[in-house]
Amino acid sequence: MTTLVLIRHAKSDWGDPGLDDHDRPLNERGLRDAPVMAARLHGTGLRLDAILASTAVRARTTAGYFGDAFGLDPVLDEQLYGAPERTLLAAAAASGADAVAVVAHDPGMTVLAERLSGGGIGHMPTCAVATFTWTSDDWDVASAIDPDEWSFDSPR
């Protein structure tokens, strides 16, 4: 079985207009939502082998909460910052993990979630979690066909 979990970073802080986009931290809501969503995903019984995250502060902080919940150290990948959907999926496949979470940004997250859900997921709000599973153990096969199952969870 192959599993892909898409996690959009939690809500970020826009309070400092001079701060580079890459360096924006989570705001109060993001700091509240991320551990809750991580615990909810962990509570489903899902097993993760790897967590990949954008190098942006808001994404790597979000990934840290999920890493804590699953006992994993997130792997930071600068290519995930602002990545299009094909890059997000390629990074997951290249990880070699059977069950991988990717923590990144819109619009790539929403585009990929929408595609993999056949339009069932119209938007990935901040800290949303979309899980896709295929019965195939091969990422080449999984990334070429529709998933067998998918689910969606959001803090709101």
Image (spheres, rainbow, N blue to C red):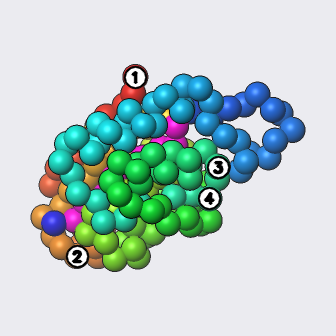
Question: In this orientation, does residue 59 appear?
Answer: yes
Q: Disc 3 marks which residue? A: 57
Q: Is 79 within the magenta? A: no
Q: What element does badge 3 sit on?
A: helix
Mark 1 vs mark 3, foreground winner is: 3
The amino acid at mark 3 is: Val
Looking at the image, residue 58 sits to the left or right of residue 133; the answer is right
- How many discs mark residues in the rendered view? 4
Question: In this orientation, does residue 145 appear?
Answer: no
Q: Residue furthest right?
A: 18
Indicate which disc residue 55 carries.
Answer: 4
Q: Residues within 10 Å of mark 3 (few under 14, many from 20)?
A: some
Q: Residue at x 37, y 36 (%)?
A: 37
The residue stretch that appears in magenta: 2-10
The amino acid at mark 1 is: Arg
Label 3–label 4 contact, CB within 8 A: no
Q: Position of residue 63 (x, y in %)?
A: 48, 51
Mark 2 vs mark 1, foreground winner is: 1
Q: Disc 2 marks which residue? A: 138
Q: Position of residue 150 (x, y in %)?
A: 22, 46
